[in-house]
Image (cartoon, grey):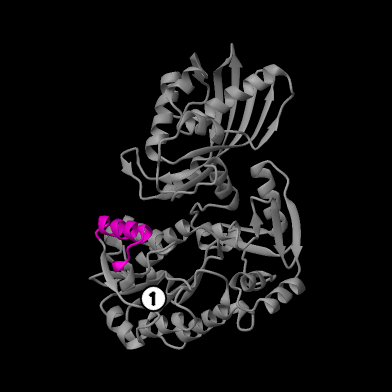
């Protein structure tokens, strides 16, 4: 049940990379969040470019009320007049308004006397970083926190998320250059970094908005992944299956680059993140870990990038998967087996089997599984025959249309195939009479299959159903 006083009215500032995920997740929660409006600059309503037109069409399809204001140019009083019509304001505009904009938005939210404010603080721990990091916008974010803490009338929640996961692989930032095969470390290979995807930030932000009193006047930490730069390089090599050049950018080098190019934002960001504190926190201590909320880590993000050949549509979109793509998605990251031709044939058979689970057609099943197939460890209510197997796959695809079975490790000895699996996706369909609300799933499983006459004949399997049920709840 929501803690927001009735009538609930939420205003989301912006509909960009983070704003749209926040809006979608708020809408998924329905009456828990009440009515949702979005604030856009007037020019976005009058723009003629394709991206702006597509965005306006999407907002109309969601039946959202659009409020017009210019966050950079309008005064505190003008913004406060708009904000006062709402119970909550969620800032999703980033730093596009220039210096001083976030302080002005915060002052307007306080002046409007709203119930709850979530400022644009989806980044590092500005309390630790404080002033003088070399990144002016970091200084302003520290001042926003000070302003919020100087009063007690308007409740607030700061959500620290680290860097957007995609930013790690942004060519202009050059932390990881996938095209050139280079991984850079900022400051030291042992320095750590926390990252989270906008989709996961949006999901947790919506949950916090729906029950804000539980998180009032607190800093909440999220982490899709936390790693050292050395671990980052290891992950990229493992998932992509190719070596990466490793290059250290020392703090002295980063400072020199900023001095040469004082207006270069990316160089300032590199220096700002070249620290051993304030830009990372243990994943085990985050809200998502404590609530067992599955999040996308770097390995999962990279697998999706790899399997979709560099294309990254929003993860709530589900498109038809070809057999070729389904087969590619099921390639083991670590494979143990001899070079014997029979082993290669069995490996291809196993890859087709998991490709079928990843959305492949029935043709993949007919060439992979024996008509005499037997499940030796069926859960209650499932037939042990091939009919039970097809029913289980259909139920999985229905519940998790974008669900994926990642083969992390696979070993083949004789006629046995042992596969350690990681299953990810979103609960977007139906399962056991229940409709999904976009919950993310992420659990492990292990299969032992016996192959005979060129097809899978028997299977022993175990899944981490406890974790799955916790994530769905």
Q: Quadrant of residue 43?
A: bottom left
Q: Which residue is mark 1?
A: 117
Q: Is 203 or 215 nearer to us in this picture?
A: 203
Residue 361, position as x, y percentages in the image: 43, 26
Q: Is residue 81 visible to us here?
A: yes
- Residue beneath the point at 52% across and 84% down: 143
Up/down of 356 relative to 27, above or below: above
Quarter of the rendering containing residue 87: bottom left
Relative placement, left or right, of 191 versus 203 is right
Count residues near mark 1 (Cα–Cα under 10 Å), then give few for <14, some for 14-19, many for 20+: many
> Eyeballing the image, is 209 above or below 443?
below
Q: Which residues are magenta?
A: 45-63
Residue drawn at point x = 72 percent, y = 76 percent: 255
Please state, as top left, top right, bottom left or bottom right, where the N terminus lies in the image.
bottom left
Q: Is residue 189 left or right of residue 9?
A: right
Q: What is the secondary structure assignment of the residue under circle 1?
A: strand
**Most foreground residue, 187 or 417:** 187
Magenta stretch, overall SS? helix
Image location (x, y in percent) of residue 185:
71, 62
Question: Is 59 part of what is drawn in magenta?
Answer: yes
Image quarter of residue 279: bottom right
| Observer able to see residue 113 | no
Magenta-colored stretch includes residue 333: no
x and y percentages locating residue 222 in the rendered image: 53, 63
């Amino acid at each position: 049940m929501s803690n927001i006083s009735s009538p609930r009215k939420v205003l989301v500032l912006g509909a960009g990379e983070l704003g749209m995920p926040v809006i979608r997740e708020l809408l998924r929660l329905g009456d828990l969040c009440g009515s949702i409006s979005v604030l856009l600059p007037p020019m976005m309503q009058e723009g003629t470019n394709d991206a702006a037109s597509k965005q306006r069409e999407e907002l109309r399809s969601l039946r959202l009320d659009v409020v017009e204001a210019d966050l950079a140019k309008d005064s505190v009083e003008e913004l406060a007049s708009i904000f006062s019509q709402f119970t909550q304001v969620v800032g999703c505009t980033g730093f596009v308004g220039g210096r001083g904009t976030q302080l002005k938005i915060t002052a307007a939210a306080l002046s409007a006397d709203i119930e709850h404010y979530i400022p644009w603080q989806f980044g590092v721990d500005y309390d630790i970083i404080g002033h003088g990091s070399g990144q002016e916008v970091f200084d302003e974010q520290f001042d926003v926190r000070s302003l919020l803490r100087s009063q007690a009338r308007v409740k607030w929640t700061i959500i620290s998320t680290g860097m957007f996961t995609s930013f790690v692989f942004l060519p202009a930032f050059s932390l990881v250059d996938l095209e050139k095969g280079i991984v850079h470390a900022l400051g030291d290979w042992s320095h750590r970094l926390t990252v989270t995807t906008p989709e996961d930030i949006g999901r947790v932000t919506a949950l916090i908005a729906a029950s804000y009193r539980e998180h009032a006047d607190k800093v909440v930490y999220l982490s899709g992944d936390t790693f050292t730069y050395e671990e980052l390089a290891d992950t990229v090599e493992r998932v992509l299956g190719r070596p990466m050049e490793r290059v250290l950018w020392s703090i002295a080098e980063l400072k020199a680059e900023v001095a040469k190019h004082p207006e270069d934002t990316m160089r300032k960001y590199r220096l700002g993140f070249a620290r051993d504190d304030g830009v990372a926190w243990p994943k085990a201590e985050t809200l998502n870990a404590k609530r067992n909320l599955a999040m996308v880590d770097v390995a999962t993000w990279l697998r999706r990038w790899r399997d979709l050949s560099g294309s990254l549509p929003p993860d709530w979109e589900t498109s038809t998967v070809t057999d070729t793509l389904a087969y590619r998605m099921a390639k083991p990251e670590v494979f143990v087996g001899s070079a014997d031709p029979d082993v290669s044939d069995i490996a291809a058979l196993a890859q087709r089997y998991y490709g079928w689970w990843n959305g492949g057609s029935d043709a993949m099943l007919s060439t992979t599984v024996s008509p005499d197939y037997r499940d030796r460890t069926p859960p209650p209510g499932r037939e042990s025959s091939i009919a039970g197997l097809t029913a289980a796959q259909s139920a999985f695809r229905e519940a998790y249309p974008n669900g994926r079975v990642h083969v992390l490790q696979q070993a083949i000895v004789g006629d046995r195939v042992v596969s350690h699996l990681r299953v990810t996706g979103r609960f977007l369909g139906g399962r056991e009479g229940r409709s999904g609300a976009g919950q993310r799933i992420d659990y492990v499983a292990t299969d032992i299959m016996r192959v005979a006459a060129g097809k899978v004949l028997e299977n022993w399997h175990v899944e981490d159903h406890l974790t799955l049920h916790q994530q769905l709840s």
